[in-house]
Image (cartoon, rainbow, N blue to C red):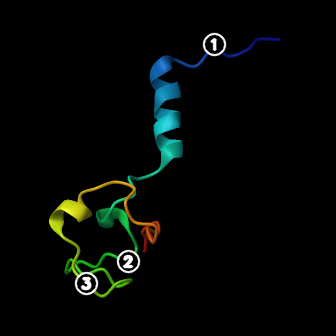
C-alpha cells in the first residue's frame, strides 16, 4: 500500500499557528466595539493596553457574524 510522504515543515508550522488561534488582544475580542469602547467594562481601554496580548481575563473570541 502506498503512503503519503511526510508533511513539509512549513505545513507543520502552519498547523501549529492555526491551532493557536488569534492573538488575545482587544482588537480580536467580542467585547471591543468599533468605537473603541469595551462593552464588558464600559470604558475605552488605553492604546497600550489594547495592543497587549493575554492581559485581559474577559477576552472572548470575536464572533464571525
Mark 2: which secondary structure? loop
- Residue position for label 2: 31
Residue 24 pos. (x, y %): 40, 57
Image location of residue 6, percent across then percent down: 62, 15
Pick the residue in front: 45 or 64: 45
Mark 3 sits on what residue?
43
* Image-quadrant location for residue 31: bottom left
Frontmost of labels 3 and 2 is: 3
Ranked by sequence position, the earlier of labels 1 and 2 is: 1
**Residue labelled with disc 1:** 5
Of the numbered discs 3 and 2, the one sitting upstream in the chain is: 2
Q: Residues within 10 Å of mark 2 (few under 14, many from 20)?
A: many
Instruction: Name the quadrant of the C terminus.
Output: bottom left
Question: Residue 14, relative to residue 43: is it above or below?
Answer: above
The spot of residue 51 in percent (x, y) is 23, 58
Residue 50 as seen in the image, left or right of residue 55: left
The residues bearing labels 1 and 2 have C-alpha atoms spaced at a distance of 44 Å
Question: Which residue is at a point 16% across and 65% down the rendered structure image?
Answer: 47
Q: Secondary structure at mark 1?
A: loop
CA–CA distance in space, label 3 to label 2: 11 Å
* Residue at image coords 21%, 79%: 44
Picture residue at 40% right of the left edge, 56% below the top:
54
Foreground disc of the pair 3, 1: 3
Amino acid at each position: 500500500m502506498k503512503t503519503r510522504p511526510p508533511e513539509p515543515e512549513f505545513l507543520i508550522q502552519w498547523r501549529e499557528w492555526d491551532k493557536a488561534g488569534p492573538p488575545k488582544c482587544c482588537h480580536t475580542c467580542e467585547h471591543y466595539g468599533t468605537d473603541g469602547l469595551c462593552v464588558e467594562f464600559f470604558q475605552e481601554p488605553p492604546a497600550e493596553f489594547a495592543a497587549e496580548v493575554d492581559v485581559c481575563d474577559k477576552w472572548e473570541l470575536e464572533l464571525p457574524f
